[in-house]
Amino acid sequence: MSGKIILYPNVSRDIGFVMTNKVYGMLEKSGKSVVVCPVLDDDFDTPVSPSGFDSRDFESEVSDAEMVITFGGDGTILHAAREAAEYGIPILGVNMGGKGFMAELEVEEIDLINTAASGAYEIENRMMLDAEVVRENEIVYRDYALNDIVIRGYNRVIDLAIYGDGQIISEFLGDGAVIATPTGSTAYSMAAGGPIVEPSARNIIVTPICAHVLEAKSFVLVSDRQVSIGIGNEKHNPAYMSADGCDRVDLGNGDVVNVRKSQKYTRLVRLSNRSFYSKVSEKLGERL
């Protein structure tokens, strides 16, 4: 492999950049071009510079990278994917967070980074979602996500109608809804009662959040459906939409959020034959 490798540490996970420094030295010793682009946790509001090397801006460096190596949890991978997917840059995750379903390596396995840097790896393409907010027949906002699109009320229940290709799926009062990819099925969707779906599948998972009717269930749809979520007009419905837990976009009565399969994919580096089922059992602490 030629070209540069980006190290993308979460500053609240890789405290003092201990792991970043170690991997930087490994890759530089093997002749690789390496740049470091720290990502800030919500607890940090000022730039943090690693010791021993200059930090760079991720958005300006990622377009011509060969690989991005993240140090953190799944949230760090989600941050990286928002830019890396634009250019088809593969991501190798080192888990320094909690569950770490998307990360390929644990800290004790970092010697395998040299294997990845030599190009001896496989790529797993993960489906993503595009979302648009329609207000009075005009698109006022667009975003995309690797995990999920979430619609929630601001501290009160909201009135939602969910459609698949224009056909009603569910209508209910509740806290909101999660529209997830298979990758996101082990995140908020699962916590809301949705199913676990193999991440390499191509499905859209619709899961109500704390619905106030027993009939509101999770649905697994084929990937070519357009899912539309309408905010009802019967009562005041202050709500918001967020993609992968990022910026909130305010929604009001009559707004519609359209969600469909994206043309973008997140490309994850795979170095082992460890199955998804074994990872779920390990991360959730119980057998399926």
Image (cartoon, rainbow, N blue to C red):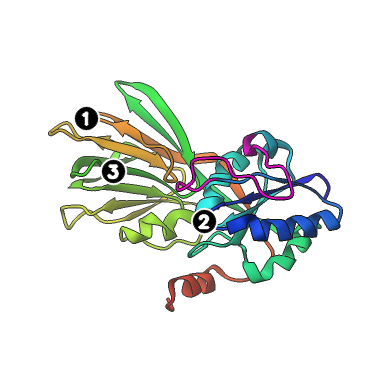
Amino acid at circle 1: Asn
Whether tag 3 and tag 2 are in contact, CB under 8 A, the answer is no
Residue receiving disc 3: 152
Residue appearing at x 74%, y 50% in the figure: 52
Find the distance from the CA under tag 3 to the CA under tag 2: 22 Å
Residue receiving disc 1: 253
Q: Which mark is residue 4?
A: none
Q: Is residue 229 visible?
A: no
| Residue with the most extreme left position | 234
Residue appearing at x 48%, y 65% in the figure: 99
Image-based side of 82 in relation to 118, left or right: left
Residue 121 higher or lower than 286, as above or below: above
Q: Regarding mark 1 in the picture, which secondary structure is present there? A: loop
Image-based side of 4 in relation to 225, left or right: right
The crowding category of the residue bearing disc 2, from other C-alpha atoms within 10 Å (few below 14, some 14 to 19, many at least 20), is: many
Query: If the image is split into quadrants, where does the C terminus sit?
Result: bottom left
Amino acid at circle 3: Arg
Q: Which comes before the other along the chain, label 3 or label 2?
A: 2
The crowding category of the residue bearing disc 1, from other C-alpha atoms within 10 Å (few below 14, some 14 to 19, many at least 20), is: some
Q: Position of residue 42 (x, y in %)?
A: 45, 46
Find the distance from the CA under tag 1 to the CA under tag 2: 33 Å
Residue appearing at x 37%, y 55% in the figure: 188
The crowding category of the residue bearing disc 3, from other C-alpha atoms within 10 Å (few below 14, some 14 to 19, many at least 20), is: many
Q: Is residue 189 visible?
A: yes
Residue receiving disc 2: 74
Residue appearing at x 66%, y 60% in the figure: 18
Give the magenta range: 40-59
Q: Nearer the viewer, mark 1 or mark 2?
A: 2
Residue toward you, 7 or 262: 7
Image-based side of 257 in relation to 72, left or right: left
Q: How many marks?
A: 3
Q: Position of residue 77 (x, y in %)?
A: 56, 51
